[in-house]
Image (cartoon, rainbow, N blue to C red):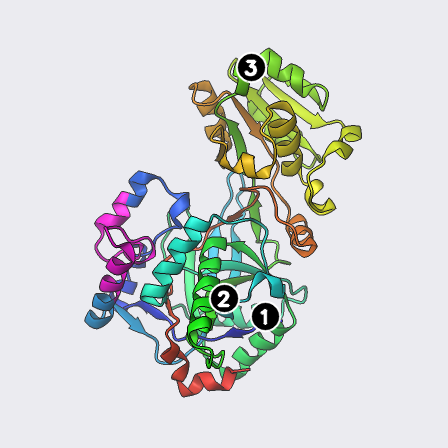
Amino acid sequence: MAEIQPLRGWRYNPTLGQHIDEYVSPLFDVVSARQREALYRNPLNSIHLSVPRGDDPAGEALHRLKEWQESGVLRQDELPGIYAYYQYFRLSGSTREYCRKGFMCHIRAYDWAEEVVLRHENTLPAAVNDRAELLARTEFQTSATHGLYRDDDFELEHYLDEAIRTPLYQTEEDYQGARDVLAVIQDAAVIRRFQQVLDSRQVILADGHHRYEGSLAYRQARLAAEPEATGHEGWNFHLMYLTNAAADDLRILPTHRLLLELPQDLTDAEFLARLEPYFTVLPKEDPYDLPELIAGKQWAFGLYLQDGQAYKIRLRPEVHEQLSWHTTPEVKALDLTVLHFFVLEKVLGIAGPDAQRQWPGVAYVRNFSECLQRVDHGEAHAAFITNEVTMDEVERVCHSGAVMPPKSTFFYPKTIGGFLFSSVRAEETAHPFLKEFVR
């Protein structure tokens, strides 16, 4: 199903690559404004290409890209390859070091209707348009989206392990505490095996829905302008980081919900009274016990209010059939669907997923302690603590053809920008070595 191709990656030159930590950048929505400003102060940081600023941001990125290519800041690898990308990390409260293993390559930019690349969340048109315009102007991709394929035999990991022994470069520690390592596979027979394995797989898009849809929009525009195109031009493809959904080192962290306001000026007592018909509500002494109290329990949540009182709440099973949103059973079974329907809609009156996405009264916070602190400081009225979504749930929802509530998944760690760049110019497919891999 999924057609992948090797690419001639663009990378920081060897001198700069020795200090790669100074030039990589995080995804734009996972860092603070202060962290972003520090990145912008470095004139060679990749953020100037991935999230350019100015009156004409895309034009600024194109100008800087040409300058970096002509001056040798960025250099293109001589041979195409598939790039092994490992991320070593630890989770809070654990001494185990995880290693998420994957590889970066070009994948054909499939329309959603083709059901080769599957999504699990909706996108915002304005953000997609920004990504499409930047790609159209620069024909350059600065950070790989994250896709998941399933291979229970773990066949490709052997080749990846062998390649990673000779890294091109690695970070000491990126902004999220992970160590990132990049290597390349340029053996034609091995690359063909990667293609064969992915050819029978669907891919679930874990992160980067807006960037992927930007590639779709650009490809559609080029196809409309060039009906004689062969389908092998570089702009038919998208830079993706692919990891095995069967791996234990694939981690999804929870994203909690803060209620910044309570409609109709509800008091805490009135709010709790409105929850009672739908949830069992049990007071708990220590709010820091909430994650453990709800762990592994379906439709269970922690609740923390401004008076400092914590609660474990759990949906009454008999009311679940009232969940009337027009979606699949797989989505209705999710904890977060239950939370959004019975709390945001039934209790607070914010009716429907569209209205909830636009409602400014909810915030999404990944750090548990931050949730409690923001309630204590009066920045929010209540915090709802959630369990993480499982990989099995993600797969079942995607294969059902539906999408999850917003901010359902936080795949950790995030990929970083600037580790590997990819050009989608038509002439990128002209290298003789690449023609071996055309389907």
Which residue, given by chain and number where applicable, does mark 3 sit on? 266
In this picture, which residue range is highlighted in magenta? 37-65
Q: Nearer the viewer, mark 1 or mark 3?
A: 3
Q: Earlier in the sequence, mark 2 or mark 3?
A: 2
| Apparent side of residue 240 relative to residue 64 in the rendered image (left or right) | right
Relative to 314, is 226 above or below? below
Which residue, given by chain and number where applicable, does mark 2 sit on? 103
The quarter of the image holding the N terminus is bottom right
Residue at (39, 84) in percent of width and height: 430
Residue at (29, 64) in percent of width and height: 17
Residue 408, image x, y percentages: 57, 42
Relative to 37, is 415 above or below? below
Which element is circle 3 on?
loop
Q: Nearer the viewer, mark 2 or mark 3?
A: 3
Which residue, given by chain and number where applicable, does mark 1 sit on? 2
Q: Nearer the viewer, residue 147 or 66?
A: 66
Residue density around tag 1, few if under 14, some if 14–19, many if 20 or more, within 10 Å = many
The quarter of the image holding the C terminus is bottom right
Q: Is residue 260 visible?
A: yes
Residue at (38, 48) in percent of width and height: 28
Residue at (49, 75) in percent of width and height: 5
